[in-house]
Image: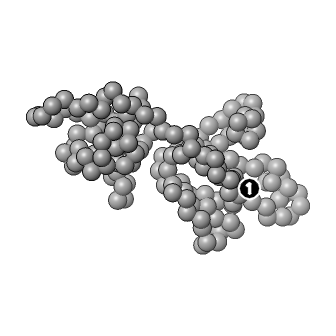
Amino acid sequence: MFVTATEAGKILGVSSRRVRCLLSQNRIEGAFKAGIQWLIPLCDGKPVITEGKRGPKPGWSERVKKPRKKDLTVVKVIRRNIDGNKNNHTNKTVISVKRGNEPAIHCHGVTLYGPSTLFYSHEARADKGKARVWLETHFDFDTFVNSDLLSSRLG
């Protein structure tokens, strides 16, 4: 899983400016820049930081925070709408996007801005709205209906 510099700062208990300073010194292993944003890999829930040459030892190794469930976005495909569209020649939305406790957004397409994980369960999962396949991400996304240019940005 990858996080941004701001999220890494929250996990480590330091400012995002300090994280960007470590990034500029190439002290965070596996970090890379995607556009204007740094993506930092997590190992056991935190970034791997190489030791500096001077100063006191870092104290962030004791403070490990997991990403909050309210930040998790779940993307599901609504199979019954796909079948209904095919049989009834309709154009109902076939994708459901839900972030944390917010109401679900129904759409025809979604663009994810960052890494995500695709899951499959051989049994329908009640906690995922009886879905068998779904995506999860902690990053921003855009949704669209009928390929319109109008999109709703959540962040």
Name the residue: 27% across, 51% down: 17
How did the renderer colour the structure?
A: one colour
Q: Position of residue 149 (x, y in %)?
A: 60, 72
Give left or right: position of 22 versus 77.
Answer: left
The residue lying toward the viewer, choosing from 148 and 53, is 53
SS assignment at label 1: loop
The residue lying toward the viewer, choosing from 44 and 77, is 44
Rendered position, 62 above or below 25 = above
Rendered position, 152 above or below 12 = below
Can residue 23 be seen in this snapshot?
Answer: no
Q: Position of residue 137 (x, y in %)?
A: 54, 45
Name the residue: 15% across, 31% down: 56
Q: Residue furthest right?
A: 88
Say which amino acid is labelled 1.
Answer: Val
Give left or right: position of 85 versus 116.
Answer: right
**Quarter-wise, where is residue 90 in the image?**
bottom right
- What residue sits right under mark 1 in the picture? 94
Can residue 87 be seen in this snapshot?
Answer: yes
Give left or right: position of 101 versus 153.
Answer: right
Q: Quadrant of the N terminus?
A: top left
Q: State the count of labels.
A: 1
Rendered position, 111 above or below 15 = below
Q: Residue furthest left?
A: 54
Q: Position of residue 84 (x, y in %)?
A: 85, 55
